[in-house]
Amino acid sequence: MLKKTGFFAPNENSIFVAISIYKMNFLPEKIQDYIDEHSDEETALLYELNRKSHLELLHPEMVSGNIQGQFLRMISQMMQPQRILEVGTFTGYATICLADGLSEGGLIHTIDINEEIKDITTKYFEKAGISNKVKMHIGDALKIIPNLNETFDLIFLDADKANYPIYYPILKQKLKKGGFILADNVLWYGKILKPVVPKDKATKGVLAFNKLVKEDKEVEKFILSLRDGITMIRKK
């Protein structure tokens, strides 16, 4: 059964967006407001999905949100990929954005370990008209990915931060030459600059991943300071 966060009242229509921005952004609030005001608004469907995720689920900050969603959509539209892999579906916000740029006959494989989200994703994939473009996988991505008989133009990594260093060589092997990996949360709430708590496996994973990518001479890379940080990685 899906759980409510216990943080939001049913009649709250707007502050959930502010909460996510507060948790994920390093920019001053007025700058973020300016960015929001001068960017396209969410579609009605994505706004509905965003709000539902915040009102009904734990960890709603996992939703990509409008600015990151617009970024993912435009990257996909520029590339017009034939195959996309997404690791970490959550409620499917980013999936819908990424699917918008798929070329004719293209497909996005999206993986999440939580079976409870499947009803939501299925509903909203249908509403977005992308059900025929999405292959949903439920289970351990580290076991699923090696068995996918595909190579990918674009990969979005946004799950299981502790295992980011383990994902990296597996994903890189599945990436076409000239393809891109987009790795989310690489600034990890600023924890990458603070002393690491011994039991904090997620922060250790992000730090190890960032070092691994930095030292990899087979790729081009840079960190984009969008929300909680996205590393863009291009396979040479």
Image (cartoon, helix red, strand yellow):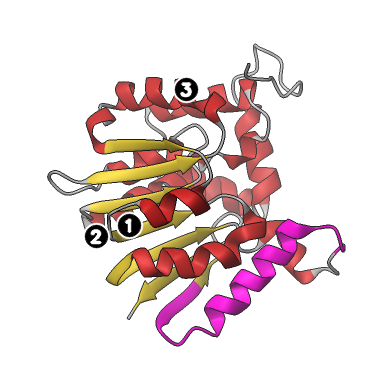
Foreground pick, 45 / 167: 167
Residue 133 shows up from this direction: yes
SS state under label 2 = helix
Q: Amino acid at mark 3?
A: Ile
Q: Which three-letter amino acid code belongs to the residue tagged 1? A: Ile
Q: Residue furthest top?
A: 11
Q: Amino acid at mark 2?
A: Met
The residue at 63%/21% (across/down) is: 55
The reply to whether callout 2 and callout 1 are in contact (CB within 8 Å) is: yes
**Rendering coords of residue 153 (x, y %):** 28, 61
Q: Position of residue 94 (x, y in %)?
A: 43, 42
Say which residue appears at 28% left-offset and 54% top-offset: 149
Q: CA distance from mark 2 to mark 1?
A: 6 Å
Residue 42 lies left or right of residue 1; in this view the side is left
Q: CA distance from mark 2 to mark 3?
A: 28 Å
Which residue lies at the image location 49% right of the left edge and 75% below the top edge? 222
Residue at the disc numbered 2: 79
Which residue is disc 3 drawn over?
120
- Count neighbours of disc 3 (C-alpha within 10 A) and say few if under 14, some if 14 to 19, many if 20 or more: some
- The structure residue drawn at horizontal position 34% and vertical position 51%, both measured from the top left corner, is 148
Q: Position of residue 135 (x, y in %)?
A: 32, 37
Vertical position of residue 88 compared to residue 208: above or below: above
Label total for image: 3
- Distance, label 1 to label 3, CA atoms, is 25 Å
The segment highlighted magenta reads 197-222
What residue did someone put label 1 on? Answer: 75
In this view, 123 is above or below 132? above
Callout 2–callout 3 Cβ contact below 8 Å? no
Q: Residues within 10 Å of mark 1 (few under 14, many from 20)?
A: some
Instruction: In the rendered view, tell whether residue 108 sits above or below residue 151.
Output: above
**Which one is closest to the eye, mark 1 or mark 3?**
3
The furthest residue to the left: 104
